[in-house]
Image (spheres, helix red, strand yellow):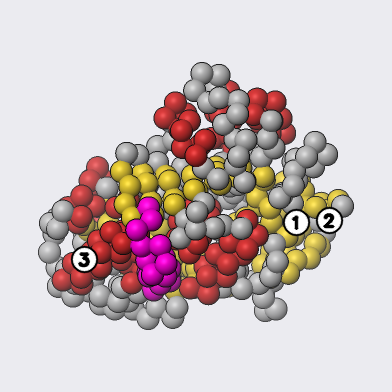
Amino acid sequence: MLLYEYLEMACNQHGNKYAIQCDNSRITYDVLKKEVDFLFSYLREQGIESGVNVGVILHNSIDYVKILIALSRNNNKVFLLNPNVSQDELIEMKKKGKIQIFIIESYLEKLLIPLECPYIVRKNLINKKVTRTWGTLEQNSQEGFCFVQCSSGTTGVSKMAQRTIENLNEDSNNIISTLNYQYDDVIYCPVPLYHGYGLTMGLIASLHAASLLITDRWFIVKNSAEKLRNASIIIGVPEIFERMAESSNFIEADTFLHAKWIISSSNKLSKETALNFYKKYKRWINQMYGMMEVSTISVNLFPDVNNYWSVGRIINGLEFRVKNNVLYVKGKTVSEAYLVDGGEKNITDADGWFKTNDIVQFSNNLLFLVDRYKE
């Protein structure tokens, strides 16, 4: 219910305010809630009851947001999958997560047919049609789980970490308090919403703060200039900032003068990219450090020429320690378990500490990433 509760709060205070914009479309919080409520009822009619495990394989869109919030209201365990998933990976994830039904983009049907698993195509779902019909699906015990984040293997082999309502609510509170998200903020997040960073920094925190979230199905530099200029908080990854720094025709030098934060996470931002971006736009990028199992770990709120490559200070509410140069963290945002072959594997040790396996250094109370762990 977490996302739906945030939506209800936003509607009560700012119902006529725009909630989300994607490509050339946008809707208000009031309209978003009405469409989510209708979609929730329709999902129930199609046999998707509370407790059903749902795999979602979609690109960024307003439909994607509606579907995630409707599934949140329905108390489903939602598996967020990368649309670039291979058929073998999909078979493995279905087995590990005991996924019972998928919601997909139409071009992915060819991957689903051999799995002999029910699915709904996004456009048909939004247009109130179904690809297949089925009886009521068997329910599972949710135990407070909200999303299952499935890594792309960027920092190792692919993994599936269960994120509870408590994990995500605590992380959202941390993001809002640390970065001062406000209802009048415009959050530009071209990062995929199936990615843990895009999900929490983009969708969940902006919904919680009743901000306007602007996202894109694809990030295209020449189409982003106005969105970047109007955004108060920009959420990107190193590859996006590399393209901005290299762009000489589409993004003007004063584009980022009024942005509160220009945040980069996922992969480590290179010094070269950070310097090139600063030379062109006279703004340092705020490096953030996080992991799928924890979400936000630290952020550099005040980068300058002496520390721009740092990932900043550990956020409030997260305990940390360093042993043999490896960072360990502990707190309410840390996931408890991975899904492995339909079962669970503990993420933390007996005392609740999560070993990141990342090599770090501290200098002047700032955290520096030396090397990210690869399995």
Crowd class of label 1 (few under 14; some 14 to 19; many from 20; radius 10 Å):
some
Q: Residue placed farthest to the right in the image?
A: 364
Q: Is residue 277 magenta?
A: no
Residue of label 2: 365
Amino acid at circle 3: Phe
Describe the element under mark 2 as helix, strand or loop. Answer: loop
Q: Residues within 10 Å of mark 2 (few under 14, many from 20)?
A: few
Residue 149 locus on image (x, y percent): 47, 60
The structure residue drawn at horizontal position 36% and vertical position 44%, both measured from the top left corner, is 22
Residues rendered magenta in the picture: 1-18
Three-letter amino acid code at the position of disc 1: Arg
Q: Amino acid at mark 2?
A: Asn
Q: Which residue is denoted by mark 3 in the rendering?
A: 38
Q: Label 1 to label 3, Cα distance in Å?
A: 43 Å
Q: Is residue 365 above or below residue 278?
A: below
- Describe residue 342's horizontal placement relative to residue 155 as left or right: left
Residue 220 falls in image quadrant? top left
Figure check: 353 above or below 249: below
Seen at 61% across and 58% down, the residue is 180
Compute the Cα span from label 3 to label 2: 50 Å
Quadrant where the N terminus sits is bottom left
The disc, 3 or 2, on the residue closer to the chain's N-terminal end is 3
Q: Residue at the location (56% across, 57% down)?
A: 181
x, y (%) of residue 64? 33, 53
Task: Kindly identify which numbered label has been placed on residue 313.
Answer: 1
In the image, residue 357 lies at what x, y percent?
A: 69, 57
- Label 1 secondary element: strand
Label 3's element? helix
Which of discs 3 and 2 lies nearer the camera? The answer is 3
Q: Quadrant of residue 55?
A: bottom left
